[in-house]
Amino acid sequence: MTFKSSSWYLQERNLYPWMHFTELFSKEQCEEITRLGKNLALTEGVVGTGDQDFGTNYSLRSARVGWFDSADDSANWIYRHLTEAVNRANSDFWKFNVEYLEGLQFTAYNKPGDHQDTHMDTGWIGEHYRKLTVIIQLTDPETYEGADLELQLAHDYTPMTRAQGSMIVFPSFILHRVKPLISGERHSLVSWVCGTPFK
């Protein structure tokens, strides 16, 4: 069936390959997550997949990362806070067969030039597959310049919201990048929603 441009859809439809929630976390919650994240053992982010570790390659990625353990009482509330929103996004727009979130990655872009080149997040995690990418903006956008998250659609890049506390969700097979940081610091939370392979 072909729909004309004047058609009226009876159900909510997402016209873009991503979804975002504004103010999922409050300013105070973002600041607390950032404080906790800065206390993690941050290491240089590496480029790799599965058991392969290709090492740090600054031409591809420059950022420091740490990991929140869902079993840690100080971080458990973050996972619980994300669950409903992640499930709603998937249920409303993709309906992928998903089972769990990978460990939350705290990412710090805190020196000029920090960035991540265009890439996809798809890959095997044990017996499961990354299906959705979840990114939470933790930093007040007025305090840094650059480090914009952009999704690549055809030949164009589309900037995502910089609003503090917002969550962006998109299929992990979509190309995306973080432009070089110019000044200030940007912190984010990143995770991947996994499930059995696509059929």
Image: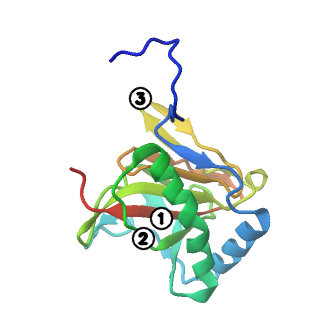
First in sequence: mark 1 vs mark 2: 2
Q: Residues within 10 Å of mark 2 (few under 14, many from 20)?
A: some
Q: Residue at x 78, y 63 (%)?
A: 27
Picture coordinates of residue 162, whole percent (x, y): 67, 48
Residue 7 at least partly seen: yes
Residue 49's place in the image compared with 150, above or below, is below
Q: Residues within 10 Å of mark 3 (few under 14, many from 20)?
A: few
> Quadrant location of the N terminus?
top left
Picture coordinates of residue 85, whole percent (x, y): 57, 58
Q: Which residue is mark 2?
A: 102
183 horizontally vs 28: left or right: left
Q: Which residue is mark 3?
A: 155
Picture coordinates of residue 165, whole percent (x, y): 69, 58
Question: Which circle, 1 or 3, is nearer the viewer?
Answer: 1
Q: Quadrant of residue 192?
A: bottom left
In depth, the one of 94 and 103 nearer the eye is 94
Under mark 2, the amino acid is Glu
